[in-house]
Image (cartoon, rainbow, N blue to C red):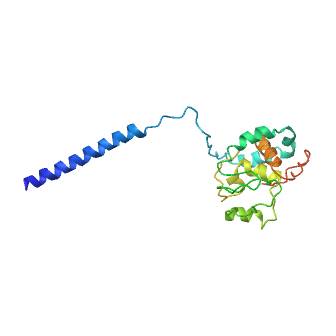
């Protein structure tokens, strides 16, 4: 009986020794250094204090006032954050999100071959709503706030000028770009 106990304990200790040796060896082989420069940081949306969201929406500058000073080249750079999930080339594929070529003034949730979330389909009102500059401005500020239940996991672009730059860039991605909004027109989205 004593030899069986000794054999079992020896087998247990031998197994532990082998597992620890493999663990140490694999750490040495597969160790990776921290990158010199981190990738994009995904910032979680902060919940404003009570009443803060309505005040921010009321203080939001209409996109028509921001577009005349927007820079499409800067928007293209900011858009690189979107390219993990969206393609924006003419005839390009859908990825995690739909292709965005010709997005401005396109009916919401209408890109062929993409399976939209039920929240996005409801928001589109059966294709009656379009991606106007105002809709895009509000959506890009906080996608999940603008369309609760959307599958888009991006926290948003809180800076007005960043949104204006991206919208001007998206505006250029069309066979016939939609006209820019009147700088004096009010924001058509009500919160």
Q: Is residue 116 above or below residue 188?
A: below
Image quarter of residue 168: top right
Q: Is residue 65 left or right of residue 39?
A: right
Q: Is residue 30 left or right of residue 55?
A: left
* Image quadrant occupied by the C terminus: bottom right
Write the residue at 60% across / 39% down: 39
Image quarter of residue 160: top right
Numbered label tally: 0
Write the residue at 76% across / 41% down: 75
Q: Position of residue 98 (x, y in %)?
A: 70, 57
Observer-nearest of 157 and 2:
2
Query: Is there any visible trace of residue 158 in the rendered image?
Result: no
Query: Is there any visible trace of residue 171 in the rendered image?
Result: yes
* Image quadrant occupied by the N terminus: bottom left
Q: Position of residue 47 (x, y in %)?
A: 64, 47
Image quarter of residue 190: bottom right
Observer-nearest of 87 and 136:
87
Q: Position of residue 43 (x, y in %)?
A: 62, 43
Q: Is residue 136 above or below residue 127?
A: above
Q: Is residue 149 above or below residue 72?
A: below
Write the residue at 63% across / 52% down: 153
| Residue reaching furthest to the bottom | 126
| Residue reaching furthest to the front | 91
Observer-nearest of 28 and 161:
28
């Amino acid at each position: 009986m004593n030899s069986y106990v000794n054999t079992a304990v020896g087998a247990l200790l031998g197994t532990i020794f082998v597992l620890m040796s493999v663990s140490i060896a694999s750490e040495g082989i597969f160790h990776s250094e921290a990158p010199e420069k981190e990738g994009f940081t995904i910032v979680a949306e902060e919940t404003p204090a009570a009443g803060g969201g309505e005040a921010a929406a009321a203080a939001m500058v209409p996109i028509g006032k921001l577009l005349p000073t927007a820079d499409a080249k800067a928007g293209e750079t900011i858009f690189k954050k979107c390219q993990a999930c969206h393609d924006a080339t003419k005839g390009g594929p859908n990825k995690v999100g739909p292709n965005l070529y010709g997005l401005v003034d396109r009916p919401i949730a209408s890109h062929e071959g993409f399976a939209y979330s039920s929240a996005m389909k409801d928001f589109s009102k059966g294709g009656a709503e379009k991606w106007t500059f105002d809709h895009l401005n509000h959506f890009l500020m906080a996608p999940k706030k603008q369309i609760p239940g959307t599958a888009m996991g991006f926290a948003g672009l809180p800076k007005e000028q960043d949104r204006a730059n991206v919208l001007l860039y998206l505006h250029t991605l069309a066979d016939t770009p939609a006209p820019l909004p009147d700088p004096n027109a009010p924001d058509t989205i009500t919160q």
